Image (spheres, rainbow, N blue to C red):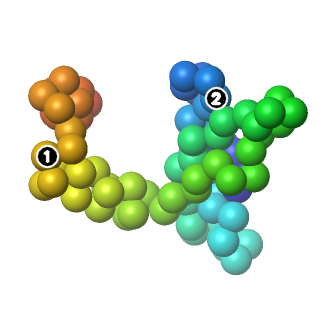
Amino acid sequence: MITTFKIPYDKGELRIGWASWDDGSLTDRSVKFAYNDKSGKTSRGAPELPFGVLTDMIVLAHQQGELDADMVAKIKTAFR
């Protein structure tokens, strides 16, 4: 991933950028939770997702009752 935006989050960062699988056309974007490993470096296992997968994961979690009322309210507030 080539990071274009990041914010601190928990013990790491939330990052948005050009996806690691982009072919150089700069058309594929992704989001990543980057956290540090035991040595203090960003973990190579930090998940990077295309935005389509991210939204599908949120929908699935909601359908399966995995999101509590506060989480759902946070999502609804973000889209007002």
Residue 67 x, y percent position in the rendering: 20, 39
Q: Residue furthest right?
A: 39
- The disc labelled 2 sits on which kind of residue? Gly
Residue at screen point 62% across, 24% down? 11
Q: Which residue is mark 1?
A: 65
Q: Secondary structure at mark 2?
A: strand
Residue 3 x, y percent position in the rendering: 69, 45
Please tell me which of labels 1 and 2 falls first in the chain: 2
Marks 1 and 2, how far apart at CA: 27 Å
**Location of residue 35 (image quadrant):** top right
Residue at screen point 73% across, 72% down? 24
Observer able to see residue 59: no
Q: Which residue is mark 2?
A: 12
- The disc labelled 1 sits on which kind of residue? Gly
**Location of residue 71 (image quadrant):** top left
- In the picture, measured across the screen, residue 4 lies left or right of residue 67, that is right
Residue 23 x, y percent position in the rendering: 70, 77
